[in-house]
Image: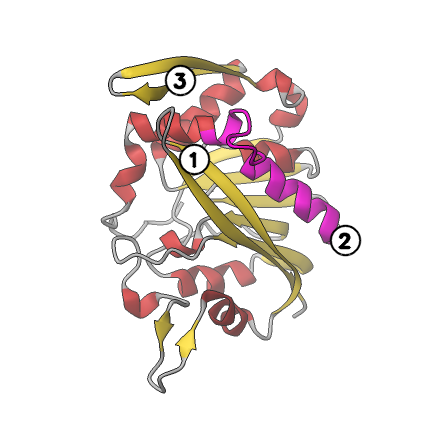
Amino acid sequence: MKETAPETPGSALYETSGLVSQYLGFHYGPPVLGIPNFPAACIDFLMNSVKLEHRNRCLDIGCAVGRSSFELAKHFQHVDALDYSSGFIEAAKRLQQSGIIQYGIPTEGRLSNDCQISLESLLDSDIANRVTFQTGDACNLADEMHNYDLVFAGNLIDRLYQPQLFLNSITQRIRIGGWLVITSPYTWLEDYTPPSYWLGGYVDNSGIPIDTFTGLSRALHPHFTLGSRENIPFVIRETGRKHQHTIAELTAWRRVE
């Protein structure tokens, strides 16, 4: 892995044990408030909506604690799974290696429920072992990470310090005919991305509002064409009575040159 950029202010937010537990519940827990599991729903949608010419190599970038990586392994021979958070990656590795991981979900105040994940309930171990988890910087990927049939960037683009740098780099790592799949609620925040690097959510110098889909379309032209576009909701549980209900947009882009 090449030297990464200095730590950004928002990156430390992902290293607390409480947030790791929260994401374990988000990725592996049952549906909340009637909303299906988000990582599984994303992979199910794209596997039914895009035509894959090859299913050899896949990159799950911003994989968090790994549910989307394991879902992708059901469809690809090899999955590289990368996240900036070492806490997230360590949790994903523990689940992969032991088959079981325990975590707590807050209910109220200092009370919590103990939960356990069994990887066997999701997929066979030989499929799970198709995934290689590692920490890394999405904007500064290792040279050997290339020749992918699909790159899945789940809720990542608005948490990068230079999203355009990521898009420029990832283009050359996807095969012609391969796919770049991006999900995001487009919540641009200065804690993660300096406003000058936002792809959308601003007014340009001509006074025209630029939304993120427009910014993505411009950034990916002429190398990609849009294949699918869909809203996919998700819920993150904070306590027994408090939840984050969000709607991400999934866009699937096919590399054409």
Q: Tell us which disc is closer to us: 2 or 3.
A: 3
Q: Residues within 10 Å of mark 3 (few under 14, many from 20)?
A: some
- Kind of element beneath mark 3: strand
In the rendered image, which quarter contains the C terminus?
bottom right
Identify the mark nearer the N-term, 1 or 2. Answer: 2
Identify the mark nearer the N-term, 2 or 3. Answer: 2
Q: Residue at x 56, y 36 (%)?
A: 35
Whether 112 is among the magenta residues is: no
Q: Looking at the image, can residue 144 be seen? A: no
Identify the mark nearer the N-term, 1 or 3. Answer: 3
The magenta-colored residue range is: 26-53
Q: Nearer the viewer, residue 13 or 96?
A: 13
Q: Residue at x 36, y 80 (%)?
A: 204
Q: Can you give x and y, in whole percent of width and height, for residue 122 in the image?
A: 63, 23
Instruction: Identify the residue under disc 3.
Output: 103
- Residue 41, relative to residue 232: is it above or below? above
For the residues labelled 2 and 3, say whether their Cβ atoms are less than 8 Å apart.
Answer: no
Look at label 2 and name its amino acid.
Answer: Glu
Residue 53 — which label?
A: 2
Look at label 1 and name its amino acid.
Answer: Ile
- Kind of element beneath mark 1: strand
Instruction: Identify the residue under disc 1.
Output: 236
- Kind of element beneath mark 2: loop
Q: Can you give x and y, in whole percent of width and height, for residue 50 in the image?
A: 72, 53
- Residue 198, relative to residue 181: is it above or below? below
